[in-house]
Image (cartoon, grey):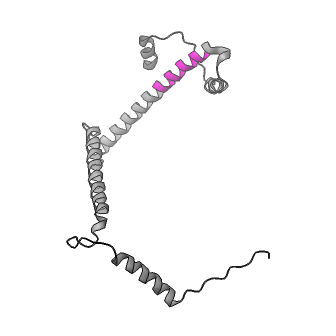
């Protein structure tokens, strides 16, 4: 090997005592306020901790208030009554169908505008169109608000 191995310096008890003595002398040579409590130099650390605790408390209170606002009017389902559970399931299915119907209508409207773009459409948009055109759909003209609502009600 071309590299020379470095020899480890073996520390003796005298060397470690010398480092301790130097650190102790540095600490003791500092000028300290006689009336100050022990570790008075670290008060800023304690202040930061207290400010952090106060900030966390404020954040928790804000989060709790936000959740309370969202829960206004919400009544949890009584899971002990099977009739109420069944009704909630049916309502959830109805809501899901409505959201799916809304998204399908929006998609259909967007695809209609993609037809208008024609050759200028981006390749990825054309791929989206091919993916969704598997199902038969009728071409739509410009939709008014009433026509759009009528599509949703189909």
Q: Residue at coordinates 52% horizontally, 18% vertically from top-left?
A: 109
Question: x, y (%) of residue 29?
Answer: 34, 76
| Residue 85 or residue 111, whichever sits in front | 111
In the displayed structure, 29 sits above or below 116; it is below
Residue 110, magenta (yes or no): yes
In the rendered view, tell whether residue 22 sits above or below residue 56: below
Considering every residue shown, the one lying at the far left of the view is 35
Q: In this rendered view, identify the residue nearer to me: 148 or 11.
A: 11
Toward the bottom, the furthest residue is 13
Q: Is residue 98 left or right of residue 114?
A: left
x%, y% of residue 137?
A: 58, 18
**Residue that appears at 33% across and 37% down:** 87
Measured as percent of width and height from the top left, residue 122 is found at 65, 23
Q: Judge whether 29 appears above or below 60 on screen.
A: below
Residue drawn at x 30%, y 66% is: 41
Visible in this render: residue 16? yes
Of residues 124 and 99, the one drawn nearer to the viewer in this rendering? 124
The spot of residue 48 in percent (x, y) is: 31, 57
Left of 151 or right of it: where is 36? left
Q: Which residue is drawn at 30% across and 72% down?
A: 31
Q: Dividing the picture into quarters, in which one does residue 37 lie?
A: bottom left
Q: In which quarter of the image is the C terminus?
A: top left
Which segment did they paint magenta? 102-115
By secondary structure, the bulk of the magenta-drawn segment is best described as helix
Q: Examine the image and state in which quarter residue 47 appears.
A: bottom left
Q: How many marks?
A: 0
Work out whether residue 76 can be spotted.
Answer: no
3 versus 114 height, above or below: below
């Amino acid at each position: 090997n071309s590299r020379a191995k470095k020899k480890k310096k073996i520390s003796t008890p005298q060397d470690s005592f010398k480092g301790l003595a130097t650190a102790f002398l540095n600490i003791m040579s500092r000028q300290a306020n006689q009336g100050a409590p022990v570790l008075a130099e670290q008060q800023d650390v304690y202040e930061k901790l207290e400010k952090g605790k106060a900030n966390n408390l404020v954040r928790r209170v804000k989060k709790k208030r936000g959740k309370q606002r969202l829960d206004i009017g919400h009544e949890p389902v009584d899971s002990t009554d099977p009739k109420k559970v069944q009704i909630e399931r049916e309502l959830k299915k109805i809501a899901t169908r409505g959201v799916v119907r809304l998204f399908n209508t929006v998609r259909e409207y967007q695809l209609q505008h993609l037809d208008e773009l024609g050759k200028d459409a981006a390749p990825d948009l054309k791929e989206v169109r091919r993916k969704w055109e598997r199902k038969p759909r009728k071409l739509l003209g410009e939709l008014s608000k009433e026509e759009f609502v009528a599509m949703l009600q189909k």
